[in-house]
Image (cartoon, rainbow, N blue to C red):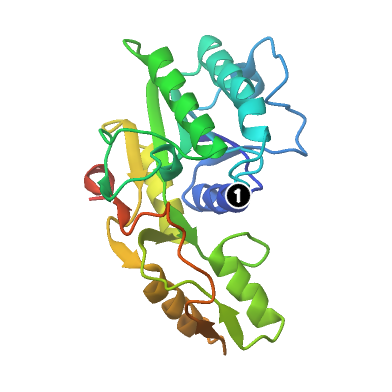
Amino acid sequence: MKIAITGASGYIGRHIAALAKKNGHEVVAIDRSSDIDIFAQHDNIFEALQKPDILLHLAWRDGFRHNSPEHMKNLSHHYDFLRSYINSGGKNVAVMGSMHEVGYWEGAIDEQTPCDPLSQYGVAKNALRQSMMLLTKDSDISLYWLRGFYIYGDDMGGHSIFSKIAQAAADGKTEFPFTTGKNKYDFLHIDEFSDQVLATITQDKVTGIINICSGKPVSLAERVEQYIQDNHYHIKLQYGAFPDRPYDSPAVWGDDSKIRMITG
């Protein structure tokens, strides 16, 4: 297949682009250094992207700054780009979503889970999802809304807890201030995450909201301790140095029913 990927040089994009090429797909990579500005007006963006079989829209500014003003500022630009792509001939569109669209929730998240986001990032992603679902309703457009959870792996230079631990280890630190670590989340290594995304966007049987997830809740402490062990870091977590945030769910994870249908 020919796959156009926006944000192709980003943390997620570079892994999926490399995997797609490895599996024999043709990749049209779009990032800030390319000639195509996705927020600009185009006579035919489908043609400008070389008429791909599917568009994978990953580009998103300030993804780790959840209350950045960029999220709402750019929301209409994302929608206009995707609408223009469809109106100019694109039939298959995959967009990276986030479990932060849901907001506070205890238990498994599925496609019917109500959304009440608690950050500007979550609000913008949720609004884009709702807009795209309305736009493609009762049409022949296949929409894949890829709802991501917590990703780790290839962490140097990132912004996650794993990135901070990797940086602390590189700086020679032996202790790392931590919360109680009791909260449970859905963690997925970037390699498995990329496998799930590529498998999803290269099939046409399952569409709509699809959780890219493990389907298993794991405590933050357990996942981080395992991460430290796997990477042979000589760091000890200082439990209780930071208080647990009152708005974090005690346990939240993705329902993996649809991704299991896709991956078998």
Amino acid type at image mark 1: Phe
Q: Tell me which corner region of the image, top left, top right, bottom left or bottom right, holds residue 31.
A: top right
Front residue of this view, candidates 19 and 135: 135
Indicate the position of residue 154 as horizontal and vertical percent values.
Answer: 57, 65
How packed mark 1 is, by other alpha carbons closer than 10 Å (few <14, some 14-19, many 20 or more), is: few
Report the label total.
Answer: 1
Give the residue displayed 35% in from the left and 11% down from the top: 139
Give the residue displayed 25% in from the left and 42% down from the top: 258
Q: Which residue is identified by label 1? A: 64
Instruction: Decide if residue 138 is on the left or right side of residue 20.
Output: left
Indicate the position of residue 263 as horizontal and vertical percent values.
Answer: 28, 49
Question: Does residue 183 appear in the picture of this structure?
Answer: yes
- On screen, 238 above or below 186? below
Give the residue displayed 50% in from the left and 18% down from the top: 90
- On screen, 44 above or below 183? above
- On screen, 246 above or below 131? below
Question: Does residue 1 appear in the picture of this structure?
Answer: no
Instruction: Decide if residue 241 is on the left or right side of residue 223.
Output: right
Front residue of this view, candidates 27 and 187: 187
Q: Tell me which corner region of the image, top left, top right, bottom left or bottom right, holds residue 111.
A: top left
- On screen, 64 above or below 206? below
- In terms of secondary structure, where does tag 1 sit? loop
Front residue of this view, candidates 171 and 202: 171
Indicate the position of residue 232 as horizontal and vertical percent values.
Answer: 53, 87
